[in-house]
Image (spheres, grey):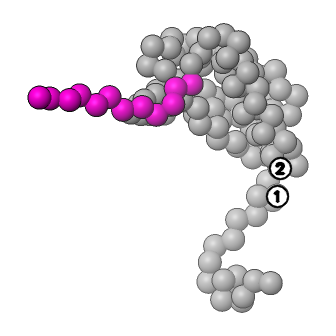
Amino acid sequence: MVPNKLIWGSPITNFTAVDKRRMEIAVGISYSTDINKARSIALEVLNAHPLVLKDPEPVAEVISFGDSSINLVLRPWATPTNYWPALFELNRQVKAAFDKNGIEIPFPQMDVHMKS
């Protein structure tokens, strides 16, 4: 049950009203990683997946520079029905492809310098 106040007073997004949905997968890579290599591997995974739409083409780009990683955003498209299965599978497949190709996904770390 949804109160009428919420229905009439808030915008409603119907994700099934369109024929495609864009996924957004965030993944960090080590600062020592070749960015173009990581992008290429990610795009291979996205383009090979049967649930990812060919049009519009998937995108893999650097979105930010974090404290411990260079952050990539992967943006493939799928139908609304295939959105969640594709998203879950792509997360696993990108991680496996990065592992296979020596692309490090770093964990957050902090260097502490002691002064005496």
- Mark 1 neighbour class, 10 Å CA radius: few under 14, some 14 to 19, many 20 or more: few
Chain part drawn in magenta: 105-116
Q: Does the segment drawn in magenta span residue 43?
A: no
9 left or right, relative to 31: right
The numbered disc on residue 81 is: none
Instruction: Tell me if label 2 and label 1 are in contact, CB under 8 Å.
Output: yes
Q: Which of 18/93 is in front?
A: 93
Q: Which of marks 2 and 1 is nearer the N terminus?
A: 1
| Residue farthest along the front direction in this orientation | 116
Position in image of residue 24 (x %, y %): 64, 41
Q: Can residue 61 be seen by looking at this rendering?
A: no
Position in image of residue 31 (x %, y %): 44, 19
29 left or right, relative to 56: left
Residue at image location 62% in from the left, 11% down from the top: 102
Could you say whether the residue bearing mark 2 is in a helix, strand or loop?
loop
Q: Does the segment drawn in magenta span residue 112?
A: yes
Quarter of the rendering occupied by the C terminus = top left
Report which residue position mark 1 lands on. 16
Position in image of residue 85 (x %, y %): 84, 42
Q: In this view, does 6 lie above or below 72?
A: below
Report which residue position mark 2 lands on. 80
Q: In this view, does 81 lie above or below 65?
A: below
The quadrant holding residue 86 is: top right
Residue at image location 82% in from the left, 58% down from the top: 16
Indicate the amino acid at tag 2. Pro
